[in-house]
Amino acid sequence: MVKPKLLSLHTPDAHSLAIDVAAIDRARILHAAKQYLREAPVTITSFPAARSVGDKHDYFSEGDYWWPDPANPAGPYIQRDGLTNPDNFTDHRRALIRLSLQMPALSAAWLVTKEELYGAHAAEHLRAWFVDEATRMNPSLEFAQAIHGRTAGRGIGIIDTVHLVEVARAAAALEGSQSFANDVGDKVRRWFSEYLRWMTTSSHGIEEREAKNNHGTCWVLQAAEFARYTGNTELVNFCRKRFTSVLVPNQIAPNGSFPLELARTKPYAYSLFNLDAMATVCQILSRGQDSLWEFELPDGRGIRKAMEYMFQYIADKKTWPLPADVQYFDQWPVRQPSLLFAGLAFSRTDYLKLWRRLNPDPTVAEVIRNFPIRQPVLWLAR
């Protein structure tokens, strides 16, 4: 397989604001990476999913907010928005999140130290998940976010692989490592190319692409980074157009809020999550003078306005004008990547100072699940 050229897009210069993310994060990166060196890769094949109609290589998850019906306990589940059912199958999601925590941390450790033991162990994760026939995951999500008694899988489940966005970014960074053999890199890229093909042509993928809220944003986020990693210029351009013609017009209100997220039972967390996803799309797709950070509709709507709206409530959550989220409200905010990326793009030192003060390593599983960009040094590497 001919290795595609990694698309080179504009990255804000961290040194322009005298912020050295590698130095800031070095201790936390190495602390995590040294722990992860002692842990072997674990893929979805280690966790049989009895309720899945797929095989052991097919990712399976169940809709978070679906519960047994008290009026019909054996029948189809019913929805309780914002309230997670702890009895649903989550082993595959936990394994995927484990990958997204460990592999990027190991890659970041290699990036800041150039010590091959970190690169070698990060490559082991990639081999297990995307290369080795016995343990690899199939490049599709036909059986994600299933609902007992209703459906074997839904397009909405594609949001689960938002945790592969930083894995793809880390894999690209790792290619400078001597431990990352070219044949492994080619096979990992092939996996992401196949997954992109599924995301862009399957009924589930098209359904998720057309979602109006954070699900549509996260489709663009994934497609943009996977296309960048695999050298798919056509899809990169599609994602840029999608941001300007669909995401911004349909999701950002004149005051900068996300009305579709505010209507949920976790408006604060969903607003943060969508903002991080949009900001990361801008980070991926901005090109020199052609910057999505600067894009605005005639009425002023754009990522700048969205950042200004949420910044006040990240800085002082007590001023949040809506009811508290039904769960985990006290655990937010954490070190939102939107603050860093936008702080650099807009030269906003107040964003950067707040980013530095916030917790970079939350331990609550629900927060980790909605905080998929955790190693910013990978996103600012030259």
Image: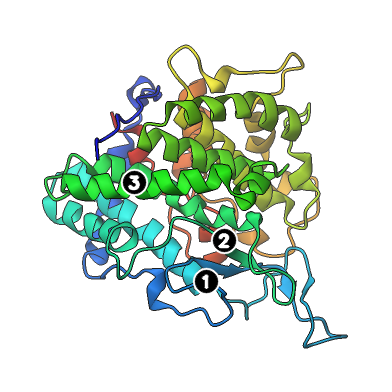
Mark 1 is on which residue type? Answer: Gly
Asked whether the beta carbons under mark 2 and mark 3 sit within 8 Å of each other, the answer is no
Q: Tell me which corner region of the image, top left, top right, bottom left or bottom right, holds residue 40.
A: bottom left
Mark 2 is on which residue type? Answer: Glu
Percent position of residue 200, x then y: 55, 42
Q: Determine whether, in the image, residue 301 is placed left or right of residue 33.
A: right
> Considering only order in the chain, which callout, 1 or 3, is on the residue closer to the N terminus?
1
Q: Can residue 55 be seen in this view?
A: yes
Kindly report the distance in space between the C-alpha atoms of the residues bearing marks 2 and 3: 19 Å
Percent position of residue 29, x then y: 29, 52
Work out whether residue 221 or residue 355 is closer to the camera in this orientation and state it: 221
Image coloring type = rainbow
Q: Which residue is drawn at 64% across and 44% down?
A: 206
Q: Determine whether, in the image, residue 15 is placed left or right of residue 226.
A: left
Kindly report the distance in space between the C-alpha atoms of the residues bearing marks 3 and 1: 22 Å
Secondary structure of the residue carrying tag 1 is loop
- According to the image, label 2 marks what residue? 142
Secondary structure of the residue carrying tag 2 is loop
Q: Tell me which corner region of the image, top left, top right, bottom left or bottom right, holds residue 64.
A: bottom right
- According to the image, label 3 marks what residue? 190
Q: Which mark is residue 351?
A: none
Image quadrant where one finds the C terminus: top left
Vertical relation: 171 (above or below) 84: above
**Number of residues whose C-alpha sits closer than 10 Å to that of mark 2, classed few (under 14), some (14–19) or many (20 or more):** many
> Considering only order in the chain, which callout, 1 or 2, is on the residue closer to the N terminus?
1
Secondary structure of the residue carrying tag 3 is helix
Q: Residue at x 65, y 60 (%)?
A: 154
Q: Is residue 373 visible?
A: no
Mark 3 is on which residue type? Answer: Arg
- According to the image, label 1 marks what residue? 54
Vertical relation: 16 (above or below) 110: above
